[in-house]
Image (cartoon, rainbow, N blue to C red):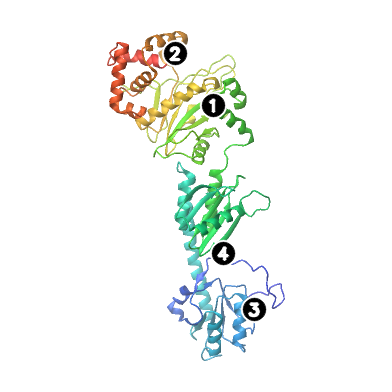
């Protein structure tokens, strides 16, 4: 009697949709033959076969009870026509036949050997001392070991992909790690087949073209598109997966081999890339993005404010990759998402910093000013006895630390004070941020963020925040302070004033100032000497430096 349950279809009817295989990797026939304790010997048919099941049957025609991929074990009790018997096994998709000798047959029938050779079915001789149940147990043990290896591989791949997703360039990093894990090519394509990012060895032109066509099949440009598709082109295995988010992005893979667990690893990458590449703004944020573009193109604050939906306070952030590599739109978008904003400008050209506009945070994280009151202003950090105080208006965070919170600007009635504590260093990035500012002063804040970034790069700090004027300087009326600054700095050109400001903020360091300005240290020396000459002042005098710094802060 057959060991499998009777299918619903009548005997001899071919199933149009075969049942899925077991949730375990297939076992190569060679691994089973390598178990010397079984004493199995291949005597006919090809050497390569993948085993999905073990099945024992003594029926003359076991076809109705086979699912495909079985190692069928039989002693040939009802074997009458070997050629017809083997033909039915091949038609059912059996992977191999194990024939037990004794007590029915002393040896494997020659006609059976010839039939297996002719029809390409591997034939194994099972010695009398090896029970069929021992063979079945060995196959299940091999499957368990293969499943364990697959799970370990998938786990390692998942950890590697998650680590890559945490890098400052998450999308290229995930693709590179995926290509490494699968040993092939990983490409992120648009719905039209345009390459966004790619990693791994490029396939031949024919396979690359087939991969692009396969990607168009799953691109969600029309209803009913499949979520994944596979194909083979001259021995290259191709697969395509649609990413979530409705943007038509597709993950396309080309590998020379297809191993168990590849689909699971690719699925993990699809989830990560869907999260990383998805748009970080909804319909309600589209107006804000338009406002950012218009602001950068010179629109007036009166035009920008209604689109932003808030008068502020807003923080402008300039960012650069610490490794010096340019940041593309997806990488910059991931930075914006980590900061909690969709207002990111990464398309100013190669070599330019990424600009991020950070708006007011959630109400619980704010210090709200009631009508008629002002938001409290925390004390500024001071140096301990024997220590050197940080520069008065630039607060730098050391690697691994969070930048100290600068003084908060006065909140207008009904507005919420900004919270610079939201800003923390981001791995792989160097950040420079302005102090929170109203929408009417975003242009000035943009310049301050650029200065803060230059200062951070010069001091190798991951984050520098440009703090607003506070302390004694805040006691001077702004109009009088500005008038005094204009008179004092009148002899200086704009480049000389910028050089002097950077030099003073970096405590007179020639090398750091040169890094911040992107010029040679001798150029810095020449400019500072020219400043001293035009101002008629001794720049080594601390009182002179303090007065100049006060004036420069007003411009």
How far across and down, in percent of the image, does residue 501 sit? 37, 20
Nearer the observer: mark 4 or 1; the answer is 1
**How far is the residue under mark 2 from the one under mark 1?**
32 Å
Question: Can you name the residue that lies furthest to the bottom here?
Answer: 106
What is the crowding at mark 2: few (fewer than 14 residues within 10 Å), some, or many (at least 20)? few
Mark 4 sits on what residue?
Answer: 23
Disc 1 + disc 3, Cβ < 8 Å? no
Nearer the observer: mark 3 or 4; the answer is 3
How far across and down, in percent of the image, does residue 492 sit? 36, 15
Mark 1 sits on what residue?
Answer: 297
- Displayed quadrant of residue 528: top left
Q: Image point 41% across, 21% down: which residue?
A: 380
Q: Image point 51% across, 39% down: which residue?
A: 329
Between 388 and 284, the one nearer to me in the picture? 284
Residue at disc 3, secondary structure? helix
Q: Earlier in the sequence, mark 1 or mark 3?
A: 3
**How far is the residue under mark 3 from the one under mark 4?**
23 Å
Mark 2 sits on what residue?
Answer: 474
Q: Is residue 438 above or below residue 158?
A: above
Q: Is residue 60 above or below residue 553?
A: below
Question: Can you name the residue that lies furthest to the front here?
Answer: 205
Nearer the observer: mark 1 or 3; the answer is 1
What is the crowding at mark 3: few (fewer than 14 residues within 10 Å), some, or many (at least 20)? many
Mark 3 sits on what residue?
Answer: 63
Horizontal relation, residue 473 to residue 539: left or right: right
How far across and down, in percent of the image, does residue 12 sit? 69, 78
Q: Is residue 364 above or below residue 273?
A: above
What is the crowding at mark 1: few (fewer than 14 residues within 10 Å), some, or many (at least 20)? few
Q: Is residue 133 above or below residue 386?
A: below
- Displayed quadrant of residue 263: bottom right
């Amino acid at each position: 009697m057959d060991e499998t349950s009777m299918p619903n279809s009548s005997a001899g009817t071919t199933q149009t949709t075969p049942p899925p295989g077991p949730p375990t990797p297939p076992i190569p026939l060679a691994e089973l033959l390598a178990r010397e304790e079984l004493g199995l010997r291949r005597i006919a048919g090809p050497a390569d076969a993948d085993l999905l099941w073990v099945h024992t049957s003594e029926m003359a025609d076991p076809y109705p009870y086979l699912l495909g991929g079985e190692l069928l074990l039989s002693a040939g009790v009802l074997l009458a026509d070997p050629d017809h018997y083997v033909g039915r096994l091949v038609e059912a998709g059996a992977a191999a036949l194990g024939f037990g000798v004794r007590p029915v047959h002393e040896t494997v029938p020659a006609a059976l050997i010839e039939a297996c050779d002719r029809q390409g079915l591997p034939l194994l001789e099972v010695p009398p001392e090896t029970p069929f149940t021992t063979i079945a147990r060995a196959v299940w043990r091999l499957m368990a070991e293969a499943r364990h290896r697959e799970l370990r591989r998938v786990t390692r791949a998942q950890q590697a992909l998650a680590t890559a997703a945490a890098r400052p360039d998450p999308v290229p990093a995930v693709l590179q790690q995926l290509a490494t894990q699968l040993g092939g090519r990983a490409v992120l394509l648009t719905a039209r087949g345009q390459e966004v990012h790619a990693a791994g060895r490029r396939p031949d032109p024919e396979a690359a073209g087939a991969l692009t066509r396969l990607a168009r099949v799953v691109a969600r440009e029309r209803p009913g598109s499949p979520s994944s598709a596979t194909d083979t082109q001259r021995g290259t295995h191709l697969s395509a997966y649609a990413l979530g988010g409705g943007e038509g992005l597709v993950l396309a893979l080309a590998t020379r081999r297809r191993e168990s667990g590849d689909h699971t690893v690719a699925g993990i990458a699809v989830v990560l890339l869907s999260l990383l590449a998805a748009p970080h703004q909804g319909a309600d944020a589209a107006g804000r993005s338009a406002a950012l573009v218009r602001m950068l193109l010179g629109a007036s604050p009166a035009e920008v404010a209604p689109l932003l939906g808030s008068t502020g306070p807003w923080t402008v952030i300039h960012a650069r990759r610490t490794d010096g590599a340019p940041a593309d739109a997806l990488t910059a978008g991931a930075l914006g998402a980590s900061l909690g904003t969709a207002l990111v400008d990464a398309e100013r050209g190669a070599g330019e910093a990424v600009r991020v506009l950070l708006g007011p945070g959630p109400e619980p994280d704010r210090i709200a000013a009631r009508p008629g009151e002002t938001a409290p202003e925390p004390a500024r950090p001071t140096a301990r006895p024997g220590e050197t105080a940080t520069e008065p208006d630039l607060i730098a965070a050391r690697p691994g630390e969070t930048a100290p919170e600068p003084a908060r600007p006065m909140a207008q009635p009904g507005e919420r004070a900004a919270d610079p504590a939201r800003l923390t260093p981001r791995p792989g990035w160097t950040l420079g941020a302005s102090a929170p500012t109203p929408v009417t002063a975003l242009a000035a804040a943009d310049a301050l963020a650029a200065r803060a970034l230059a200062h951070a790069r010069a001091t190798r700090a991951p984050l520098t925040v440009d703090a607003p004027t506070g302390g004694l300087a805040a006691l001077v009326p702004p109009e009088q302070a500005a008038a005094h600054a204009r008179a004092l700095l009148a002899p200086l050109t704009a480049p000389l004033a910028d050089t002097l400001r950077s030099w003073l903020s970096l405590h007179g360091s020639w090398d750091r100032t040169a890094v911040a300005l992107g010029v040679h240290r001798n150029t810095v020396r020449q400019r500072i000497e020219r400043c001293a000459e035009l101002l008629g002042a001794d720049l080594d005098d601390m009182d002179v430096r303090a007065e100049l710094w006060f004036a420069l802060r007003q411009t």
